[in-house]
Amino acid sequence: SRLSSPSWFQQGFCNSWADHFLDSHALCFLGDLLGGGALLLENLRRYKRNSDTKLKVAMAVSAFTVLHGFGHMMIGHVLDRDFMASVRPTKLPGWKAVLYYVSSAVFLAIGPFLGYCNGVNRHACVVAHLIAAWAF
């Protein structure tokens, strides 16, 4: 984005074309939702025919792509401009801190899922995931 928009750092995290109808957050949301959603549906269709573990991984990556798009929508259009300051757990009311933790856990769930699909102990995946979500 440094090459496509010199004002990227002045406009906020990961944001280009802030003065346009569709800024980079909205475009990422649309692209990830449509592309990731289409891939998720196609991989699900294939998985129903052949329940291969590789297709579970492909579905997880596709779902993560959709979640990535929702992350951009949250950052660009729901949260404050300095979203990192707005999501610090120490500055949030209890219910928002819990919501933030759950959102982080869902967003980061692909890592332990892929580990589990590749033979890592389920309990180790859960513990590592909960710690990673807390640190995020």
Image (cartoon, rainbow, N blue to C red):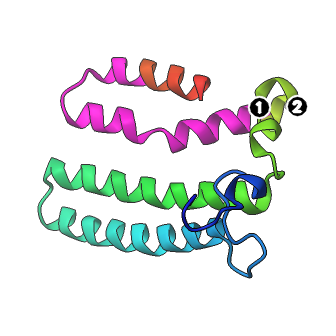
* Residue found at x 64% / y 71%: 26
* Residue found at x 35% / y 19%: 123
Q: Is residue 57 visible?
A: yes
Give the residues in magenta: 97-126
Q: Amino acid at mark 1?
A: Ala
Whether residues under marks 2 and 1 lie with C-beta atoms below 8 angstroms apart, the answer is: yes
Looking at the rendering, in which quadrant would you find the N terminus?
bottom right
Q: Please give left or right for residue 53 compared with residue 99 in the image.
A: left
Looking at the rendering, in which quadrant would you find the C terminus?
top right
**How many numbered callouts?**
2
Which of the labelled discs sits on residue 59, or is there none? none
* Residue found at x 36% / y 24%: 125
Which residue matches tag 1?
Answer: 97
Which residue matches tag 2?
Answer: 93
Q: Secondary structure at mark 1?
A: helix
Rounded to the nearest angstrom, the CA distance separating label 2 from label 1 is: 6 Å
Does the magenta stretch mainly form a helix, a strand or a loop? helix
- Can you say whether 117 is above or below 34 in the image? above
Task: Measuring from the top left, give residue 87's x and y in whole percent.
Answer: 77, 37
